[in-house]
Image (tube, rainbow, N blue to C red):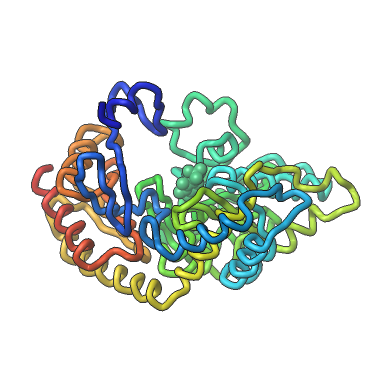
Amino acid sequence: MTLEERDKKHLWHPLTQHKLHPETIAITKAKGCVLTDEDGNEYIDAIASWYTCMYGHCNDYITSCVSAQMQQLDQVVFSGFTHEPAIKLSEALIKILPENQNKIFFSDNGSTSVEIGIKMALQYHFNKGEKRDTLIAFEDGFHGDTFGAMSVSGLSVYNGPFEDFSLNVKRIPVPNGKNHDAILSTLQDIVSNNKVAGFVYEPLVQGAAAMKMHNAEGLNKILNFCKNHNIITVADEVMTGFGKTGKHFASLYMATKPDIICLSKALTGGLLPMALTTCSQKIYDAFYSDDIGKGLFHGHTYSANPLACTAALASLELLQSDAIQNNIKTIIASHKAFGNRIKTHPKVKSTRQLGVIFALDLDVKMERYGNLRDKLFTFFMDNGVFLRPLGSTIYIQAPYVITQKQLEKVYQVIEDALKII
Ligand SMILES: *Cc1c(COP(=O)(O)O)cnc(C)c1O
């Protein structure tokens, strides 16, 4: 039996309606930007396995650091104990995070990092003796699949069955460069009628909403509004963090910095699951008390796992290396040239780019997970490129180590796909 056949017996895959999509592809190897399946077919991983493996799969430097750490300390409780990998990681991160960030809280995936951000925002006000029970979020955001994260997310195809179990959330449109005033008056209405604790948002790029991009100046105005009303701002940089936007963090594009930042995905370079919620001293101070009940009583068994911390530390070193920073510049320039080449194509409605994130909208109507999406996916895979179109959007977020030749192949396959739609 093939792996694909054996898989069907006991496995239930994420984000999959198994009746409609019975096929899975068994991957047996990954190195650099290439995935290999059980039949020996190779695919360029043009979305870095959901934006995680930005330094390439099985990166030699990251794996060798983790392998050394494995001989020394594998796992230990992080309540009451600490260890050097977590300490070193905190020191390295604080150097590059927005300057107001000063404390780091560990968890193991993007959803829980948002969950913790929400809890910090809600408990901040609780600890100050103020009852604030409402959150603000963008329309069409995506923040993960746990309950708090689902509540602030806007994609209801997935959240439908749970809508009645949601936190109180008011939604605002993303700033498009023209709607600042309308958004600010909506915000004014919201704060007049609700007690708002926090604002949870994906800064500048909404990943799951098909790489929808928005305006930095407008976002800055929203952040200022929040600041003036003591609404705790929670930047979900799970996708945008660690260089994707051309800066280390998307939040660095705005003058006003968030109170809290959520990070995961590329944090460990894709080697191990880990997430962080970072915050300013102001947030931390609201929990620092003689009253035990004012502490943040949230924890995960694997919080600050030493191996994951080591992978993150190695990844951070790579991110800041000249080699990776130069690669990022080259990819940005290549995407720009590709965008210019393709944007006048009759089947292309529009293109957009921020840093290494590139997206194009096709000029066709289709269901988000409709047939054309499947047809495109299959076409890309048949031609050796792993891309996951979202609705009528094709996007690229390749590892920083992708070669020019591999990148040209990705562009070519996309251009060829335009002929079959
Ligand atoms: C992927 C993602 C999440 C959820 O992270 P998981 O690790 O899948 O739980 C949250 N927010 C954003 C912006 C993401 O891209």
Above or below, 311 against 300 in this view is: below
Seen from the viewer's position, the closer of residues 335 and 25 is: 25
283 shown above or below 113: below
Of residue 134 and residue 294, the one placed in the foreground of this image is: 294
Instruction: Report the quarter where the N terminus lies.
Output: top left
Instruction: Residue lying at the far right in this picture: please name it.
Output: 290
Where in the figure is residue 216, as x and y percent of width and height? 47, 64
Up-down relation of residue 320 to residue 149 (above or below): below
Q: Residue at x 41, y 27 (%)?
A: 12
* Count of numbered circles on the image: 0
Say whether residue 198 is left or right of residue 369: right
Left or right placement of residue 76 versus residue 92 in this view: right
The image position of residue 105, as x and y in percent, is 66, 54
Q: Residue furthest bottom?
A: 322
| x and y percentages locating residue 286 in the rendered image | 79, 55
Q: Is residue 82 visible?
A: yes
- Give the residue at x 39% y 49%: 50
Q: Is residue 256 visible?
A: no
- Which quarter shows the C terminus? top left
Instruction: Kindly identify the residue that appears in the image at 19 percent across and 65 percent down.
Output: 405
Asked where in the image residue 28 lies, by quadrant, the reply is top left
**Looking at the image, residue 20 lies above or below residue 203:** above
> Would residue 415 be found to the left or right of residue 295 on screen?
left
Residue 99 lies, in percent from the top left, at: 63, 71
Give the residue furthest to the front: 71
Residue at 29% from the left image edge and 52% from the top image edge? 45
